[in-house]
């Protein structure tokens, strides 16, 4: 950690800063510049509160040298984490394709969709039971009944299921769910993250609409700090000024998060832009950029979908996408499933 | 609502769209353009699901004419809502100044700060008991004990108290709190909003880091849809590319939200930029732009604050700000308190 | 074009709007909604000034149905444009790899780099003679001498050359340049675009840091409106809140611009993030997403580069990237060169 | 300047970095951390190229301690710069109100508007002769004739005139213009900035749509580096994700730029949001936040304006705004004119 002092710093304030740092057990080296003095801190600075140092009267600003995340940091855990979900692996050489509707609507819809996506090569099933909707007047999901229907679809197809949680008090309903998804709007719902840290379920954590990669990793850290290491990072598009697409897929996040962290990376090419015609090129791009899994919206009848119909593929469209993805996955030296 | 059809729309798909609209009880008028046909929907379109229409095969895109929010919409409720908090009014001609530390740390700190801000003219006390921190390793607040200390400070000073909730399961602890704050990171924590809609507590709802004004109003709508009309909208800076300030205060949101909604508007000039030296000019600007209240971070000893010390004013600095604000409030024809 | 009228519109103002529209030769159809009247305009609305209509007292807002760009619009020109540069084709099945240093610095540097990139498979040479630098105190390029050195490198290697123009008054110096680049900061330097429209040189137009795809296409339209159809669109990363990367590569722009426009698409994976370690994955992703060319920074000695050294590949690193790119290009059914 | 070295840095590379720094005449102090070594540079680092240092193989990253701008930096020039325009002062205690149409359209329009805004209290006249329009098919301005009409309006009213330049080759036409405006889209048109630096005209430099304050100051530095110190900084709204307003006014930029720079600050409340109803509150907010001038769009007949009609005030609306502004200016201890 580097501390840049104000010009003409007051001697008492300076001594008080040094005292505080010494109490914390870090060693201080100083450099006298022309206009500024600079202090470099040597030792374990991970327990220093950067805000507290920033608040000292002599401090102009503080710059971190080390990253603030530990458990998810590749520096301290060089090998890829591989999350096991009912025997299927996310991470390393394996590619999982998670497909299914935005919302679970009824038994026919979810089973028909599950069977269709399985036939095309999907390896897991997604479907929303609790739906975060911008409007309180929009369909909010089937809740517990939705999870029951997902489990029926799992029974029918053998596909592990992924579904979103919106509040810690619903956690009991997720006992048989295979992967619990935390949506973009809840990426910094820290109370929820803490509770998930106490479970041992695989967690698919989506990046918030306007969250930096560092904040994203810190949210993963919240879960891991509780003891749950089964965390997957999902890039799903960030919010920018562009209006032709709903969000902007940050494709560079895929290789960069792989450099910084050992956790598997998932990409959601459906929410990334909200346009079905872009799912195929963005899926291919994500695979070659290093994604370990894709999560794609597919509905057996998008024109009747209760949510997100316009960004859902039909089973036929999904089949076309899979026919492009399979040879690319193989060409890239990865294994589907 | 306006529906723009694709060129060369299929006749069956078109009839299926018309049937669907007719079922919903809306009347359809058509316009034949050169490249596109346009349908205008007449009647109550508020129950139509825009996503479902967008998902129809013949639809190119859908454009709303009416705003999607009702309860908070000034069009249907022209008079200003005035929220009463222990006899103090937020809205209309009244200006409330809410001041206090980021976190409640101990009894001396909160009571000393409360007395200081009251002396300078603050009319309510803020202080965090549950703290949403980016890092799991940072101080997370005193929780129930923090609320107990806030109540002690209220007893000592008579100032109503404002504090943040992070999860619905903590609601019981907030029984004696005067205003419950929903933080920026929870603006779209819809489960929490629904629970707060069932209470009758005044709610101070902060705008999310990257949420549009429309989404902000829709979140207020979530609370009001549950029956709780005591909602205040708080602009606290949005996330942009600028790096000199932590956030960018969207000052235009103040008059624009007043045009669109009857709810009171609060501004947080402390979080807006993270720089104490900007609190005074931004407070003045917010008042003249029409804010009904300000919420300002003040700490009796920022250099020892457990959070946000660098953006907290000292009691002396806050007193200086108040000495500028009081005459401006009077000049603007408003009443402090 | 759709015009939504204000509630309670004044009759005189309404008649004045109808008169104005009638003068422009468009036919008007009306729909009476509950709160709003809607007018649909039939006929050629491309000459209507949307701002002028917006400024009429009865108008609440105007929504375009047709896209505002014509010459670059795929709707009116379904076949891909293929730009010919010294016999090499950009567009269609061909992939060009443009490589070279940020700045031309001296004869040895540019010729050595040109020979190295050619050996690895690059098909064109880039190099800056006029450099847009944030600081007036930074190296500004060799100007005319830089172009002379590029031509020497072309002579030595046969690679066509690409270099950036910063002002129309320098155009004479670009007489022998093969592709003229317009940088991101000049994407809306309309006077420059108009001048380039009068030339017949291939133009590589970079997207502005914060420009929408629609604005990007409108800037291409400026060049084409002058008669020059040899325009290539270059996605080079947009500005967002993310700080780990210099910019955010908008990968979805590649397939989406291909849908909207017939012009070739180039991607700059070097400026996109500013990180050399991401050039390989982003290059692969761009190719599978449909890019027709890549422009990559390579320097024979990045540690001595006068600009952008940190984002330049060494010849060895570039060779490694090409060894990954070549099989992918072939696998994707495209032709290098 | 602080240099953070990579872990396990190569000894030869390290020596080569030290040699390079020594050649530049800076002294180096080192700190050995646990994982990283840190070098602090002492001496005049303003001539060091941060990119070059970043490109050295041993360097992890470089952090500047000093600001990169000198001529516009308040640190080296503590007194406010006051720009004199025909005897009227911009800066210090004086407030100038610059009003007029987006485009100069004809003699009657500009003279009628000039007389109206003067009567209401405007102290300078704005009007566009060269118009940067997104579409090549939109009205582009009257060019030289527009400037002639502005000069006629100046003769009729005595108001100094402000008009935008779009290319250095038009500079001769601006010989009698009082303030030359550089538009947001040209803020980093460095060739234009250099040419303006060689003139001695007052320059009103608008902030780019997506430029940081630091980049904004660096563009002012370009002009000042050429010898022209008559620069004014104009905040006119930045581009964000918000859609209710055209841009987001960064009100915090006003006091923050005053802290960092001695140059006068102008605010454009018209372009800031594109909504006439927000001009009054944003004008008041800008004055109390410390703006030295406002530039406001007024048209004698917005419904017939050839550009920006929807964001132009009528003379009556402008008069209402001035009636609110005048007492506030006086109350704030400033002088109009």
Image (cartoon, coloured by chain):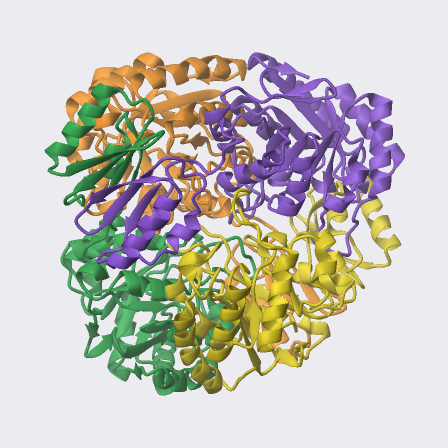
Chain colours: A purple, B yellow, C orange, D green
Does residue C93 lie above or below B148 as drawn?
above
Give the image location of residue B264, x and y in percent: 62, 73
Q: How many marks?
A: 0
User: Residue D183 sits in which quadrant?
Assistant: bottom left
The residue lying toward the viewer, choosing from C326 and A86, is A86
Looking at the image, residue C296 sits to the left or right of residue A72; the answer is left
User: Residue B182 sits in which quadrant?
Assistant: bottom right
The residue lying toward the viewer, choosing from D183 and C270, is C270
Does residue A231 lie above or below D212 as drawn?
above
Q: Quadrant of the N terminus of chain D?
A: top left
Q: Quadrant of the C terminus of chain D?
A: bottom left
The residue lying toward the viewer, choosing from D295 and B268, is B268
Looking at the image, residue D326 sits to the left or right of residue B256; the answer is left
User: Residue A297 sits in which quadrant?
Assistant: top right
Give the image location of residue B147, x and y in percent: 63, 62
Whether residue A181 can be seen here: yes
Query: For the point 88% across and 34% down, which residue is it?
Result: A107
Give the image location of residue B43, x and y in percent: 81, 64
The residue lying toward the viewer, choosing from B42 and A294, is A294
Looking at the image, residue A134 sits to the left or right of residue D137; the answer is right
Does residue C278 lie above or below B203 as drawn?
above
Query: For the point 45% across and 86% down, which residue is it?
Result: B331
Give the image location of residue B303, x and y in percent: 40, 58
Query: For the point 21% across and 66% down, which residue is it?
Result: D202
Whether residue C2 can be seen here: no
Query: For the point 59% across and 32% down, which residue is it?
Result: A233
């Amino acid at each position: 950690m580097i501390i840049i002092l104000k010009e003409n710093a007051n001697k008492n304030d300076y001594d008080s800063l040094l005292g505080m740092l010494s109490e914390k057990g870090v060693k201080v080296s100083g450099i006298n510049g022309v206009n500024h003095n600079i202090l470099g801190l040597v030792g374990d600075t991970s327990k220093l509160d950067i805000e507290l140092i920033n608040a000292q009267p002599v401090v102009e600003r503080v710059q971190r040298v080390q990253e603030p995340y530990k458990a998810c940091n590749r520096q301290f855990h060089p090998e890829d984490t591989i999350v096991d979900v009912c025997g299927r692996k996310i991470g390393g050489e394996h590619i999982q394709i998670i497909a299914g509707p935005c919302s679970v609507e009824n038994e026919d819809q979810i089973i028909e969709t599950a069977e269709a996506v399985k036939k095309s090569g999907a390896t897991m099933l997604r479907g929303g039971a609790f739906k975060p909707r911008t409007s309180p007047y929009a369909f909010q999901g089937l809740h517990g009944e939705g999870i029951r229907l997902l489990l029926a679809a799992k029974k029918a197809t053998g596909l592990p299921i992924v579904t979103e949680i919106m509040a810690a008090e619903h956690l009991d309903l997720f006992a048989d769910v295979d992967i619990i998804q935390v949506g973009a709007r809840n990426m910094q719902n820290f109370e929820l993250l803490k509770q998930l840290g106490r479970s041992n379920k695989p967690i698919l954590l989506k990046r918030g609409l306007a969250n930096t990669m560092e904040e994203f990793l810190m949210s993963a850290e919240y879960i891991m700090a509780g003891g749950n290491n089964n965390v997957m990072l999902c890039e799903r598009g960030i919010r920018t000024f562009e209006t032709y697409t709903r969000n902007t897929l940050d494709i560079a996040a895929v290789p960069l998060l792989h450099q910084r962290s050992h956790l598997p990376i998932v990409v959601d090419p459906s929410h990334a832009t909200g346009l079905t015609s872009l799912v195929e090129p963005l899926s291919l791009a994500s695979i070659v950029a290093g994604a370990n899994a894709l999560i794609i919206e597919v509905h057996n009848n998008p024109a009747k979908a209760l949510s997100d119909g316009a960004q859902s593929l039909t089973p036929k469209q999904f089949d076309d996408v899979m026919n492009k993805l399979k040879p690319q996955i193989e060409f890239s030296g990865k294994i589907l499933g």
